[in-house]
Amino acid sequence: MTKRSISLNCDMGESFGAWTMGNDADVMPYIDMANIACGFHASDPQVMSQTIKLAESHEVKIGAHPSYPDLQGFGRRSMTMNPDEISSMLIYQIGALKGLCQSHNTDIHYVKPHGALYNDMQKDPVIFEAVLDAVSSFGLPLMTLAITENQTLLDLADRYDVPLLFEAFADRRYQANGQLAPRNLQDAVLHSTSDILSQVQQIAKYRKVRTIDGFSIDIEADTICVHGDNPQSIAVIAQIRELLAKENLSL
C-alpha cells in the first residue's frame, strides 16, 4: 500500500449576515484547505470575501463548498432535483466564489459539496455525474468520500477527466459500507478528544477506521476534515495538526 501525505481541511465561511457560526480566525492557521460556503446553505458575499482574505493570509488553499438551496436546514436535507438542475446550481455557486477569489487575485483549487448533497452523490451515480459535469466546467478536482470500492464512481470521474481528492473525517463515525453514519444515529459524531485523536491516528497511520458497529475497514485518504461546528474537534485541532505532521514526516 502506497502511503500519502495527508492534509487537513475544514468547512469555513458559514456565517450569514449578523449570525456567526464556527471559529474561522482561530482554525485557519492550523489547516491546509478551506472549504468556503457559497451562499446556498450558509454564507453571503461579504462573508465569502472575508473568508477568502483570511485563507490567503495563512496560505491556505481555497475550495468551493456548494450545497442544495437549503438555508433553513443548513444544507443537511436532501432535495429532489434533476441532473441539469444540480449541475446549474453548482456552476452558479462555484462561479460566484471564483469571481470573488479573482477580485482578491487568487483562485479556487477544488470543489467539495456540502451536507446532504455530499452524501447523496456518494450513493447515487446520477447525482455524482451531475456534480462531475459542473466541476469539469472549471477544470478542478472534486473532494469526495474515501471509498475505494465504488468502481462506478471512479469510472465516472475518469470519463469527465475530474481528479478526485479522497476525504476522511476526524469526528464522524463510519458505517461498515464506508459511508458516514447518519447524524440522527447515537454517537454518529465524535465528541471526546481521545476519540477524535484515536480516529485520526487510525486513518493517518494505519489507513483504517473502526465503524460504528465495530468493524475495521480500510480507508485511503488524501485529506482529513475537521468540522468547525463541532466545539470538541476545534478544541483539539492543534493536536490533530501535530499528529498529522508526525505521520506525514514518517512516510
Image (cartoon, rainbow, N blue to C red):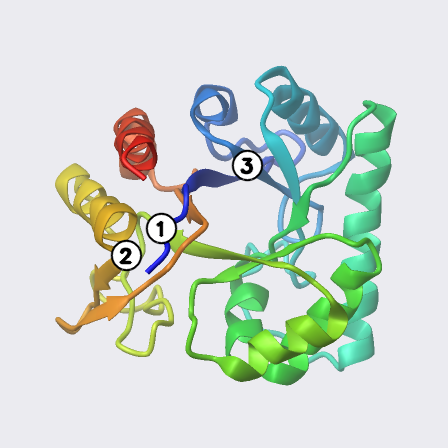
Q: Secondary structure at mark 1?
A: loop
Taking depth in this image into account, of 42 and 149 the one nearest to the observer is 149
Three-letter amino acid code at the position of disc 3: Met
Q: Label 2 near label 1: C-beta < 8 Å?
A: yes
Measured as percent of width and height from the top left, residue 207 is found at: 28, 56
User: Would you name the residue on which mark 3 appears?
Assistant: 33
Picture quadrant where residue 81 is located? bottom right
The residue lying furthest to the top in this view is 57
**What is the number of the mark on residue 3?**
1
In the rendered view, would you say 98 is above or below 190? above
Label 2 environment density (alpha carbons within 10 Å; few <14, some 14–19, many ≥20): some
| Disc 2/disc 3 C-alpha distance (Å) | 21 Å
In the rendered view, would you say 64 is above or below 248? below
**What is the number of the mark on residue 207?**
2
Taking depth in this image into account, of 16 and 200 the one nearest to the observer is 200
Taking depth in this image into account, of 161 and 28 the one nearest to the observer is 161
